[in-house]
Image (cartoon, rainbow, N blue to C red):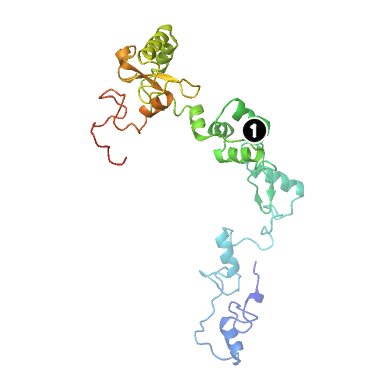
């Protein structure tokens, strides 16, 4: 059982070798050119290893460096030296295993591929791979130009919807859109298609009166009422006086009391006034500071009427 490791001991005192054939103290003496038989200042009697039959000097906790390393690895200290398993090509019995036996043993320990396909990974460079070969960046539908164009341009899906379907982020889908030359829709159009600014999500929501407004505007009664209002006002805009109806500046019948706030005045002729298209847009804009052609107390541009404009205009 005894195994002398004289190659690791100082040739002068038998303590652990530092450099060359000497321990740290005798190595310093040789560097300074002093005789090696000079007494060391902090020399202590060398204690042997506590394992029976081992004559090596102790390194730590009463054990030599060899047995201390065994203790840290959890190997029995009394195990014979000749039967200890060394190297990756020895089995637990200490005998060499064949290549086929090593492949079978590795397959039993091999983890599954990280992509979720269930295939086992291979052993390479002392460790198992995380992904099987060719599975790190597997094929995704958004990498096909035909499929991506169909989803985005024909089916009108948003980038977030395509990314959620493929299990990736929106930036990955957008990168391939740029690669294939697919034009990205404006943000306003994407919000409209995604339904994020429709219905109650729209800041201009007025309780869902749009279908009712469309039904009224298509009716015969409304067309006759508008014609009567235009005839009353002489077919002229009551703000700018324009009377020539063009394709870009048509005459409108404007509600003085808004459609949503005053439903009882929608078909009242006194609540309607003739305006051209440009003046109609001006009435409903922030430029109409004095609320002209708007009923007092209406929600749109509601503020105190005064002869002076508000601050900030």
Report if residue 169 is visible in the image: no
Is 39 or 107 nearer to us in this picture? Answer: 107
Residue 215 appears left or right of 73: left
Quadrant of residue 34 within the rendered picture: bottom right
Task: Please name the residue shown 40% across and 11% down the image.
Answer: 227
Task: Please identify the quadrant where the C terminus is shown.
Answer: top left
Is 265 or 48 nearer to us in this picture? Answer: 265
Task: Please identify the quadrant where the N terminus is shown.
Answer: bottom right
Instruction: Give above or below for 260 relative to 178.
Output: above
Is 163 or 61 nearer to us in this picture? Answer: 163
Task: Please name the residue shown 62% across and 79% down the image.
Answer: 19
Helix, strand or loop for disc 1: helix
Report if residue 142 is visible in the image: yes
Task: Please name the residue shown 41% across and 18% down the image.
Answer: 210
Q: Where is residue 146? Give x, y as percent.
A: 68, 31
Residue occupied by mark 1: 141
Task: Please name the residue shown 42% across and 10% down the image.
Answer: 223
Q: Where is residue 137? Give x, y as percent.
A: 65, 41
Residue 211 appears left or right of 171: left
Is 36 or 301 nearer to us in this picture? Answer: 301
Q: Where is residue 113? Give x, y as percent.
A: 64, 41
Quadrant of residue 33 within the rendered picture: bottom right
Instruction: Give above or below for 107 relative to 162.
Output: below
Q: Residues within 10 Å of mark 1 (few under 14, many from 20)?
A: few
Q: Where is residue 26? Give x, y as percent.
A: 59, 85
């Amino acid at each position: 059982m005894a195994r002398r490791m004289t190659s690791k001991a100082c040739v002068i005192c038998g303590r652990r070798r530092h450099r060359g054939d000497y321990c740290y103290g005798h190595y310093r003496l040789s560097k300074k050119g002093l005789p090696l038989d000079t007494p060391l200042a902090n020399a202590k009697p060398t204690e042997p290893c506590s394992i029976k039959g081992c004559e090596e000097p102790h390194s730590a906790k009463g054990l030599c460096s060899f047995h201390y390393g065994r203790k840290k690895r959890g190997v029995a200290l009394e195990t014979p030296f000749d039967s200890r398993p060394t190297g990756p090509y020895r089995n637990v019995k200490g005998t060499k295993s064949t290549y086929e036996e090593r492949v079978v043993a590795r397959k039993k320990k091999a983890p599954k591929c990280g992509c979720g396909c269930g295939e086992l990974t291979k052993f390479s460079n002392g460790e198992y791979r995380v992904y099987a070969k060719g599975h790190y960046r597997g094929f995704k539908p958004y990498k096909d130009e035909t499929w991506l164009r169909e989803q985005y341009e024909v089916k009108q899906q948003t980038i977030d919807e395509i990314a959620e379907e493929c299990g990736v982020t929106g930036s990955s889908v957008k990168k391939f859109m740029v690669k294939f030359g697919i034009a990205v829709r404006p943000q306003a159009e994407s919000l409209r298609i995604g339904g994020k600014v429709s219905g109650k999500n729209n800041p201009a929501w007025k309780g869902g009166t749009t279908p009712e407004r469309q039904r009224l505007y298509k009716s015969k009664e409304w067309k006759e009422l508008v014609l009567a209002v235009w005839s009353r006002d002489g077919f002229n805009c009551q703000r700018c006086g324009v009377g020539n109806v063009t394709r870009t500046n048509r005459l409108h019948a404007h509600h003085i009391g808004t459609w949503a706030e005053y439903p009882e005045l929608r078909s009242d002729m006194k609540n309607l006034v003739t305006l051209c298209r440009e003046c109609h847009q001006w009435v409903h804009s922030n430029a109409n500071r004095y609320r002209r052609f708007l009923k007092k107390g209406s929600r749109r541009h509601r503020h105190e009427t005064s002869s002076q404009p508000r601050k900030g205009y």
